[in-house]
Image (tube, grey):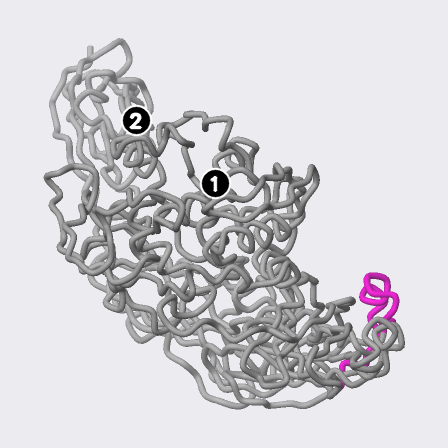
Amino acid sequence: MKKLLAMAASVLAVASVLVGLQVSGPTASQEPASALSGSSFQAGNIISDANFYDGTAMTADQVQAFLNSQVSSCTNSNCLRNGRFSMNSRGGDAMCSAVTGGSSLSTAQIVTRVSAACGISPKVLLVTLQKEQSLVTNRGPSAAVLERAMGYACPDNVGGRCDPAYAGVGNQMYWSAWQWKRYSNPPGTSNYFTWFNPGATRNIQYNVPVSCGTKPVNVQNKATAALYYYTPYTPNTAALNNLYGTGDGCSAYGNRNFWRMYSDWFGSPTGNAAPPVTALGSFDVLTAGYNSVTVEGWALDRNTSASTRVDVTVGGTETSTTANRVRNDVGAAYPKQGPNHGFKHTTAAPPGSQQVCVWAVNADTRARASLGCKTVTVADGSPFGSLDSAVAVPGGISVGGWAIDPETSGRIGAHITVDGTIVKKMWASQSRPDVGRAYPSAGPNHGYSATVPATAGVHQVCVLGINVQNGATRNVGTCKTVNVPGSTPIGSFDGLTATPSSVSVWGWALDGDSVDRIKVTVSIDGKARSFTTKSTRSDVARIYPAYGTLRGFDGTWTVGAGRHEVCVTANNVGAGSNRSLGCKSITVVNAAPIGSLDVVQPVKGGVQVAGWAIDPDTSAPIAVAVSVDGATQRVTANRDRSDVARAYPASGPAHGYEATIAAKPGARQVCVQGIDSAGGVPTSYGCRTVTVG
């Protein structure tokens, strides 16, 4: 260590590696003070001498209770809450009095022994452990992190090893405290540390690059000077504006984080020293009930035999009780205070994993001692269950399901709500063997079913399970959306198509008053035809499952060419009235056949004709009428004609015709017509005269 103090450059080199760069926010057990703001930071008065140099500010029990409150459980043996560490015994010098070491000391023992020997507050040591390596809240730190616990004489570069003379939890805390005392130039040392001396304005850098600039700071006390020797930078505006986060490229965080963490944990670092804690006790037992926890233990104040107040926090809520139950073991250990210091307290708790913390409060209520925190899983006493079905039926909505309150095997209330309004109150008491098998302790009698009235339209249906003891009344299962058809029929006129000689109609219809099929009337140009829904519509059944799938209608009627008006009406059943499903217009067009008479020639005993014929209304072969001197014979145009297929690809190749028609010798007139597939006017392909030999 003498080498470190030999010259200013060496001291500054040591100080430079102590800059705390942690910028993480507070942990779950370290909530920021609601009023804490970066504007309150005083660069020249970070912490008072009274608070910094109070070596007896906390007892070992209080340090241990504090560590317990920050970490609910550890994941390895390096955790400060439970870990055991070594520290060398050392003789006294100008900085520290003699300190007794050991090979298996708790963190609390090391902190309080070093603090008492060197006159540095245990709170300062705890804050620095967190500022430098987040060790207070680390549930399972590595050995490498423990090695550089206080950041003292350890290079900042990644993987840089600490000087072995200063490495490890015990060494790090002792030498950091020793160095802080040395910064004050105590009697018996040289007046070496002067560049941050109190009483003058000092230009303190914002960060390592000189380009970041400096801030003139009127250093007001030795403790603040010691922090600047340890971490020679002051936070800039960006760092203070984002107190629990990061600033900018010139922000340094060591002294800001020290001030912030001390404030969050122990109150103002510049205010009066915290009052002494005279309360103590033990948080022995934590049990969970439905929506509640029960804590048991003991608490007393060393200065009085009067009963002590105990504060309990769970789920963000604090309650209090009085430790006045008889505990003879406590009376034997503390005869002056007597045995009446036990407590057993039950308080409400949210369901799920909860951390429960307990404090013993001083008799003067000015301070309290943490008795630690424990974690427990709290069960929910609220009802649970299922809304199995909610479907529209004649008369309203059919609802069914089951409901149980975990705190009773008896029936509970089940209230049906429609759109948020209770429409029926009943008991969940019907037999449900499946529920009994799943929850044997509750038994099978927890089912419910009912039909409730509802107007036509879309409704949200829920069922409230009525709470019995702890917990709260709430919906059991998932609410369902139900579309109620109502008494007047509903449906849809989905489609209307036409052929050259007919129209086809289709859609669906149902009446909410009946699960039977209903009649539908189709009117074409004012002429009505009625029939019953009969085709399958699974899409309709998904929305209205109680009414089945046979809700579709379809039909085809022969009509002439031209424009037609088609209307559909769903016929009412029971209450309500008929409902029009709408009207649609369509034009029926009959295209005339096309074709050609390619060949007319005499053959022995008759006439040979050939050509092609197509009806644009169909791709099927059509008939061709061949007449010889008025005597007509029909043939089918179904022979392959690839040339026709190329010209009319949508019709295909099978539209050629060829035939030999018997005829007497002499001059004969041959005529050919294409026959319309829809019965329309035939198309003439021409006439020719030939002489039959």
* Label 2 Cα crowd, 10 Å radius (few <14 / some 14-19 / many 20+): many
Q: Position of residue 182 (x, y in %)?
A: 39, 46
Residue 92, by quadrant, is: top right
Magenta part of the chain: 427-444
Q: Is residue 458 left or right of residue 212?
A: right
| Total numbered labels | 2
Picture coordinates of residue 216 (x, y %)? 13, 55
SS at mark 1 in the image: helix
Q: Amino acid at mark 1?
A: Trp
The secondary element bearing badge 2 is classed as loop
Specify whether residue 598 is painted magenta. no
Q: Which mark is residue 647?
A: none
Percent position (x, y) of residue 108? 62, 53
Q: Quadrant of the C terminus?
A: top left
Q: Is residue 637 above or below residue 618?
A: above
At a point 74% along the width and 68% down the height, the residue shown is: 282
Quarter containing the N terminus: top left
What's the CA distance linking mark 1 and mark 2?
Answer: 112 Å
Tell me whether the residue at label 1 lies in contact with that at label 2, contact meaning CB atoms closer than 8 angstroms.
Answer: no
**Horizontal arrangement in the rendering, residue 506 relative to residue 485 (left or right):** left
User: For this view, does 618 lie left or right of residue 54?
Assistant: left
Q: Which residue is mark 2?
A: 637
Q: Is residue 622 visible?
A: no
Q: Which residue is mark 1?
A: 175
The image shows residue 51 at horizontal and vertical percentages of 43, 65
Tell which residue pokes out farthest to the front in this image: 188
Residue at x 40% of width, y 31% of height: 2
**Type of the residue with mark 2:** Ala
In this picture, is 167 found above or below 256? Answer: above
| Along the line of sight, the residue nearer the viewer: 113 or 563 | 113
Tell me what residue is drawn at x 24 percent, y 47 percent: 194
> Along the polypeptide, which appears first: circle 1 or circle 2?
1
